[in-house]
Amino acid sequence: MKANGRASELSNNRHFKYDAPARLLLNLLTCFVLEPKFLSGEWRIKEDALAGLKSIKRERDLIYGRMFSIFHHLNVCRNCHATCCAGQYDRFTVFDHISDLASGSDASRPWGFRIRPVGSYAWNRDDTGVCQYFVEGKGCRLAVIERPEICVSYVCGRMREAMTDEQRSEIARLTNMLRGIRWKYIRVLLMGGMEKGAQIPP
Ligand code: SF4
Ligand code: SF4
């Protein structure tokens, strides 16, 4: 019953149109307005806005769950020798940070918005070559809903090849919905959801 409810909640979610101008606007607002507010430490999220963010995060978690289920069934990562979790642990963006805050987590993770969110190997902050959340032989130690969006939604060539047409189109739909989630966070926060005050935890 619960699974059916979740599925219909997801399928009823209105599809956000995310074309190139919308993407540019989203990136500009994030880079030059939203992230600087958080980084300044001078702004905090209003209590009533937090309730809105929590509800948006619940939507995001449903999308994560659906994506994870598709990728889990594909099961191509297990036998892959690529190093997707190696060398780059600064994959958290400001949106992942907002999701953390919405869930009440006080986790302090390295984060920062990137127009292209996956940092290059050269940006590896401690040069260990492995994500701090990667455990040898076990994979990511974070629960799926705690992972950076890029780690949940990334589709490589091998995965794309292994997918059916239906799965590809479902992943495209869910990816689009994740972009819509970013817009929802931005709308809540930049339309009166933040106020100057105590520092936001980094
Ligand atoms: S995402 Fe692709 S490249 Fe990365 S581990 Fe999985 S199958 Fe390999
Ligand atoms: S957060 Fe998890 S999935 Fe993402 S790079 Fe680190 S170990 Fe891998």
Image (cartoon, rainbow, N blue to C red):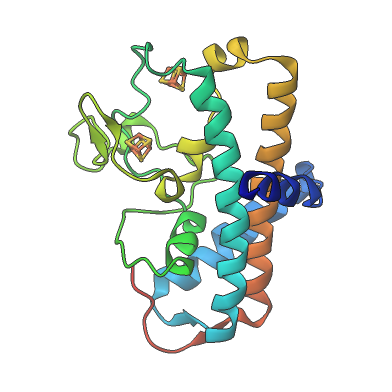
Q: Is residue 167 left or right of residue 133?
A: right
Residue 58: x and y, percent?
Answer: 58, 59
Q: In the rendering, at what x and y percent does residue 74 appear?
A: 53, 18
Which quarter of the rendering shows the C terminus? bottom left
At 57% from the left and 77% from the top, the residue drawn is 51
On screen, 160 above or below 193? Answer: above
What residue appears at the point 65 percent right and 82 percent down from the top-left corner?
192
Quarter of image, ligand 1:
top left
| Percent x, y of residue 197 | 43, 89
Q: Nearer the viewer, residue 160 or 86?
A: 160
Check the image and name the residue furthest to the front.
1
**Foreground residue, 27 or 153?**
153
Residue at the (56%, 60%) spot, across then down: 57
State whether residue 99 is above or below residue 161: below
Considering depth in this image, is 83 or 57 the residue closer to the camera? 57
**What residue do we see at 38% from left, 12% from top?**
80
Residue 17 placement, left or right of 179: right
Above-or-below relation of 72 to 88: above
Q: Quadrant of residue 141?
A: top left
Label count reads 0
Q: Is residue 23 left or right of residue 50?
A: right
Coordinates of residue 42 in the picture (x, y in percent)? 42, 82
* Residue 50 falls in image quadrant: bottom right
Q: Nearer the viewer, residue 189 or 10?
A: 10
